[in-house]
Amino acid sequence: MLTVSRVQVLKPNYYQIGDQVHIYINNRLYTATAVKELEEDNTMLFVFDSCLSEKRRITRRHYRQFKGTFEDTYLFKFLVKLINKVPTKIKRQMVPFENGSYFRLFEKDDLAPSSKNAISYLTEDSKRLIRFFGNNASNYWTQTQNKEDKSEFYYISYNGKPEEYSEWSDVSYGIVPLFKLKNY
């Protein structure tokens, strides 16, 4: 038996879960997959299929010295500036998140099947959470902080399993951005 899979190149005005888009950032091609329809603002949530080309720390300070929110981190500032690296053609279709940034990281609730915010496309198959940095599976950061210790952040391990909080926010892990595109 022969199985055939076909790819069509479209100029869509409506995305479906599983659709993929290609984006050049810093002259490197990335693929992102549509994972959740967000009806409140008529957008589709996309996630990069691999880590960005360099690993980053959440903070630049020693991890125990950080006491702010995710929006105060070195990594958040990097994500805010990342929009300047996106081609205008894609940028025009993007919609910012509530904090004004065009990119964000996973939040713990995105990956909890019992959460109303869960991304079922990813939680139904944990292999879909595995991301690579080069040829190797990589740990990567989320933006969820430990409520008891603001210096600790939740992360996804190299095997696609959401992990508890890492006390090492000054260690470089992969970056897997999410973004929204207009969906109408």
Image (cartoon, rainbow, N blue to C red):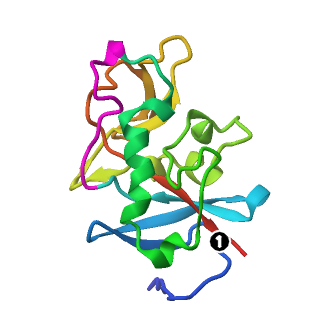
Asked whether residue 60 is drawn in magenta, I would say yes
Left/right placement of residue 133 relative to residue 153 reads: left
Residue 166: x and y in percent read 38, 22
Q: Which residue is mark 1?
A: 16
Residue at x 51%, y 64% (from the top left corner): 33
Asked whether residue 87 is drawn in magenta, I would say no
Vertical order, 74 against 128 (above or below): above
Q: Nearer the viewer, residue 35 or 121?
A: 35
Left/right placement of residue 68 relative to residue 16 reads: left
Residue 136: x and y in percent read 23, 49
The answer to whether any part of residue 160 appears in the image is no
Residue at x 65%, y 69% (from the top left corner): 182
Q: The residue tagged with tag 1: helix, strand or loop?
A: loop
Dominant SS of magenta comes to loop
Residue 23: x and y in percent read 40, 71
Number of marks present in the image shown: 1
Residue at x 62%, y 36% (from the top left corner): 109
Badge 1: residue crowd in 10 Å (few <14, some 14–19, many ≥20): some
Residue at x 51%, y 26% (from the top left corner): 69
Residue sticking out furthest to the right? 40
Residue type, mark 1 in image: Gln
Q: Which quadrant of the figure contains the N terminus?
A: bottom left
Which residues fall within the magenta stretch?
53-65
Residue 113: x and y in percent read 65, 39
